[in-house]
Amino acid sequence: MPGTRTPAGLGEKGAALGKKSQNLRPIRRLLPFIFRYPWRFALMTGFLLVSSLSSLAIPAFAGRIIDKGFLAQNFGAVSQYGLVIVALALVMGVASAGRFYFISILGERVLTDLRRAVFDHLLSLDATFFDMHRVGELTSRLNGDVATIRGVVGMNMSMLLRGLVTLIGAVTLMFMTSSYLALTVVVAGPVLILPVLLVVRRLRRIARRAQDTQAEMSAMATEALGAAKTIKSFVQEPVQSREYGDRAEQSYAAELSRLGTRATILGTMVFLSTSALVLLVWWGSKAVFDGVVTAGELAQFMIYALMASNALSNLSELMGIMQMLAGATERLVEILDTKPTIVGPAVPEHLPEPPLGTVAFEHVDFAYQTRDDEPVLMDLSFAINPGETVALVGASGAGKSTVFGLAQRFYDVTAGRVLVDGHDVRVVDPGLLRRRFAYVEQTPTIFAGTIADNIRFGRPEADMAAIEAAAEAALVHDFVVDLPNGYDSIVGERGVMLSGGQKQRLSIARALLKNAPILLLDEATSALDAESERLVQIALERLMQGRTTLVIAHRLATIRDADRILVLDKGHLIDEGTHDALVKKGGKYAELARLQFRDESVLAD
C-alpha cells in the first residue's frame, strides 16, 4: 500500500554525507558548471566590480561636498561634486542591471545543465539503484532541490557577491578615510560576526532535514496518486490522508525550525549592528570634537560604515540561504556521486553480425541486494538455440523474471555466466546487448503521448510508414483508424485512454518495430478477456516468427506448442521438455497442468 513502506534514502553513503558535511563545501560542485561559460562569468564579474566600486566612490565625494562645499561655503564645489555623484549613479545603475542580467542567465544555464546532468546520471544507474529508492523521492531531488537552487542562485547569489565586494571595499576605504575611527571596526567586527556563526552552524543540518521531509512527502504523494484506484477500491482514503498529513506536519515542523533559526540570525544582526553604529557615532563625534577628524571625513566614514553594516547584515541573512543551497546541492551531488554497478568494459567484445539469437545460462547463481542477498537462482544452466521458443514455468518467486533481467544485464550474476550470441554479457557493451532483445511485459509500459510516439519508442528514427507497418502486424491499426486523430491520438498517462488489450497490442507493435532477434514475453495475455486475448495472441504469433523467443508462462495453454519448457522451482531447474513429454513424465509440471486443465482429454492430447 502507498505510504506503508520504509522511506528509502540514498543509502549509507548518502546518510554519511548528510552527517559529516556541515559546511558549504558541496557548493563547490557547482563551480564546474559555472566555469563552462567563461565569457558570461567574466561579464558578470566585470559588471559586479563596476557597480560595487562606483557605489563605493560616492561617499568620498559626499565627504568633499561637506568639507569643501558646506563648511567652506563654496556652492560651486557642491554643484561640481553633485554632478560627479550623478554620473557615478548612472554608471552604477547600468552596471547593476548588467550584473543582475548576466548572473541570472548564468544561473539559469547552470541549473539547466545541472538538472540534465542529474537526470542523465539517473538513467545510467542500474536496476538495483531503482529497486532501493522511491521514484517520488528521486523526482523531488530532481525538481524540488533544483528549484531551491534556482531561488538562491538568481537574486540571492547576486546580492551575496555584491555584498562581499561592498564589505571588503567599504572596510578598506574606512581605514583609508580614518584609521583612528576604523579601530572601532576591529573591535566591533568579531562581536557582530561570532554570534551569527554560532547560529549558522545549526542551520545547515536543519535545512537538510527540511528538504528530506519534503522529499519524503513528495514520494508518498507520487506513490499514492499513482495508485488512486487501488486506494479507492480498498477504501483507504482516510488512511492515506492521515499518513500524508503526518508527513506534511513533519515537513512543517522542519521548516518552522529552519525559519526560526534564520529569524534568530536576522534579529541578532539587527540588534548588534544598530548597537555598533550607535557606538561608532559616539566615537566619531568625540573624534570631531577633539579635532582628530573633520566633519566631512566623519560623514564619509559613517556612510562607509553603514554600507559595511548593511552588507554584513545581508551577508548574515544570505549565509542562512547559502546553507539551504548547500543542502540542496549536497542531495543532488549524492546522486551524481553514486556509481552504477553495471558498466560496460573498457574494451568491449563485438557481438556477431548478423545476430545469432542464442541465449545460455551456465551454472548461474544470483541474489538481489534488496532481499538481504537471499539466493534467487542456484546453479541454473540451460541453452536456447536460434529460432527456438522456450517457456519458463514455475510458481511465483521461482526466478522466471530474474532470468529476463540477467539476460539483458540489468543485474550481474553472483556466480556463473550468461551468454548471448556466444559472448558473456559482462564483456560486451550493455547498450548493444539490449538492442538484441525485444521485451513485451505482462503489464505494458505506455508513455504519455501519442500512439505513434509509443510505437516509435522501439526505434526512434523510424518513419511513419514503418510505424504503420508494425501497427498493422500487431493489429493496432484496426482500432487506431477509428480514433479521431489516428496515430496522433493522445493515450494519456500510463495509457489510461486505452483498454488492456489495446495497450498490449501497442507494446507488441513497439517490439515489432525494434526488430530484435531475441524476444522476451512475460505472459502477455494473462489479464485479458477472451476476444482481446485472441487478438493479442495473433499479434504475438506474428512477432515470434523468425525470432528466438523466451516466454514466462502463467497460463500453460499458451505454451503447449513451445519447443521446450523449463520448469523452475525455488531457483533450480528441476525439469525440461515439451508439454506432452512433461505431462507424461509426471512431476511438478504435470501437477501444474492438472490444476489448470481439468479436462483429462486435454492432458492426453
Image (cartoon, rainbow, N blue to C red):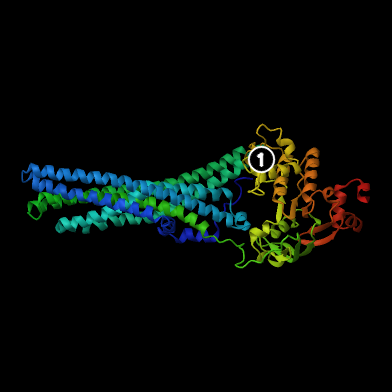
> Residue 502 at what x, y percent from top left?
72, 39
Q: Is residue 491 above or below residue 365?
A: above
Q: Residue at x 70, y 36 (%)?
A: 480
Q: Is residue 117 visible?
A: yes
Q: In percent of the image, x 49 and y 57: which residue is there?
A: 333
Q: Is residue 370 left or right of residue 180?
A: right
What percent of the width, then of the height, locates residue 101? 36, 46
- Would you place residue 422 above or below residue 205 in this image? below
Residue 193: x %, y % from top left:
29, 56
**Which quadrant is the N terminus positioned in?**
top right
Please name the residue that numbered disc 1 is placed on: 451
Residue type indicated by callout 1 = Ile
The vertical placement of 505 against 132, above or below, is above
Q: Residue at x 51, y 54 (%)?
A: 117
Label 1 secondary element:
helix
On screen, residue 86 versus residue 319, left or right, reads left
Dot 1, crowdedness within 10 Å: few (<14), some or many (≥20)? many
Q: Quadrant of residue 194?
A: bottom left
